[in-house]
Amino acid sequence: MSFIKINNKISNYNEILSIEGDKSLSIRWALLASQSHYKSKSQNLLLSEDVMNTLDCLKKLGVGINLKRNWCQIHGVGLNGFKYKKNLQLDAGNSGTLARLILGLLVHSNNNIKLKGDRSLSKRDFLRIIKPLKSFGADFKSNFGKLPITIKGTENPLPIIYNEKRGSAQCKSSVMLAALNTDGETIIKAKKSRDHSELLFKYLKLPIKINRKKNYDIIKIKGKKKIPALNYKIPSDISSCAFFIVLTVLSKNSRLKIKDVNINPSRIGILYILKMMGVVIKKINLREYKGEKIADLIIKSAKKIKPINCPSKFNSYAIDEFLLIFLVAAKAKGVSYFKNLSELNEKESPRLKWGSRILTKMGIKNILTNKSIKIYGNPGLKIKNKIIIKNFLNDHRVFMTSVIAALALGGKWQIYNKNSIKTSFPSFLKKIKSLGAKID
C-alpha cells in the first residue's frame, strides 16, 4: 500500500498557481455534450479518474470522444441516442456524481444496464435517486439501494413532481437530466445546493424556469428540446483550490495567488465560513463566463483565527471542504461548533468521523455526534507525536487534508493511499511540492 512521509512544516512562500478544471463541471459538460446532436469541445478538462470514468461510460454507450491532453471533443448522439450492447455494464469507479447523474440519462434506455462502482461508492446510498427516477417509469434492481444497480428505462418517461429535501445537487441534477427525455414539464422543489446544472441549462437555452425562495428553489423543466453544442473552457475547481487556501492561511508569512477560480456562490461556502473566522481572501479580476462567476484569489497567512458557531445554511455550499475547515478551527482561540452535517458521513468515507479522528490524532479536543462536531481550538498547537493515517476507504479528501495538516501544523506523518488523489486531483502532490513542500 503506497504512502508518503512528511516530517517538516512547509517554509514560507509567495507564489502563483493555476489549478485544473472543476470536477463537477467536467462531468456535467461531458454528460450534457453527449445529449447534443452536435460536436462539443472543452478545454482545461480535469483528467482525473472520475472524469475519465465518465468518458469511458459514454464511449460504452456509443458516444464518440476524442481526447488530447486536457482538450476533448464529444460527438453528441442526441436525447435517447445511446447505442450499446445488451447486458452492458458501466463502472462509475469512485464517482457519486457520475453514478447518480448518468442514471438520470438512462430513464429512456431500452435494455438492462448494470452500473457498478468501487468498494467506497458501493457503500453509498442510491435509494435517494432510485425513488424519483422510478417515478419517471424506469425499473431498478439494486443491492438494498446500493450498487450494483440494474436500470431498465421506459419508452415513455413521464414528467414528475419531485421534492428534494437533502440539499443534494447530485439528486437534483439527475432528475433534471431525466426530465429532458419527457413530454411535459417536470417540477422540482429543491433545497438550496450547487446550481451548476441550472446554469448550464440556462446557457444552453433549454426550457428551464427557476423561482428562487429563501430556503429552496422551484425548478421547472420541459423535455424533448434539442441540445446545442457546448464549447467550454472549464474554470478551476474551488474544492481543489481549498487545500492551498487553507495551507496558506495556516502557514507563516506566506502569500498565494490562484488564477481563474470558479467562485459560483453555491460553491464558496468555505470562503464565507473563513471570512467569519477572520480570514481575509481577496477576489480580483472578477468576470462571468457562460453563467459561472470567475475570479483570481489572493490568500495570505492568517494572523488571528476566530472560533465559529457555523450557520447550517452554508453546509451544502461547503460540503466537500469541511475537513479543511476543521483544521482552521483547530487553530482558533476558542470553541467552534458545526452542526447538521450527517451528509458528510454519506461521502466516499464517513468524513465527519474522519475529521474527528484527524483532530484527535493531532491532540485537538473535540466532541463528535452523528451529525455535529465541537472543536476546542488551540492557537499554540505544537504536534510532536507520530501520526499515521490509513484505512480511510481510499477517500481522496482525507488523504489531501492530512497532507495539509502535516505541512501547516507540524508533526511526523505517515499517510497511506496516495493514489487516491487520482480520483479528483492527480497533480495535487506536484502542486504542493512546487510551493516548496518536502514530501518523502
Image (spheres, rainbow, N blue to C red):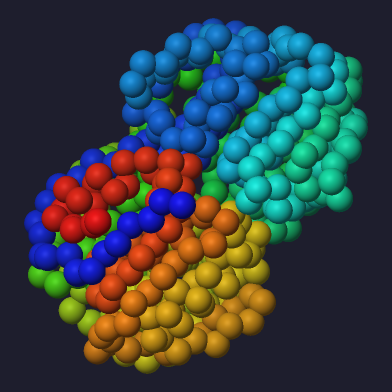
**Residue 411's image quarter?**
bottom left
Of the pair 210 and 147, the residue shown nearer to us:
147
Q: Is residue 142 left or right of residue 198?
A: right
Residue found at x 21% / y 74%: 302
The correct choice, above or below, for 261 with respect to 183 in the image is below
Number of numbered markers? 0
**Farthest front residue?**
1
Q: Is residue 108 visible?
A: no
Residue found at x 20% / y 51%: 433
The correct choice, above or below, for 78 with respect to 403 in the image is above
The correct choice, above or below, for 353 with respect to 243 in the image is below
Residue found at x 64% / y 75%: 371
**Quadrant (top left, top right, bottom left, bottom right) of the C terminus:** bottom left
Q: Is residue 387 left or right of residue 260?
A: right
Of the pair 45 and 41, the residue shown nearer to us:
45
| Position of residue 393 measured from the top left corner of the image (x, y, whole percent) | 57, 56
| Position of residue 180 measured from the top left corner of the image (x, y, whole percent) | 71, 25
Residue found at x 41% / y 31%: 47
Q: Is residue 426 visible?
A: yes
| Position of residue 19 measured from the top left corner of the image (x, y, whole percent) | 29, 42
**Residue 424's image quarter?**
top left
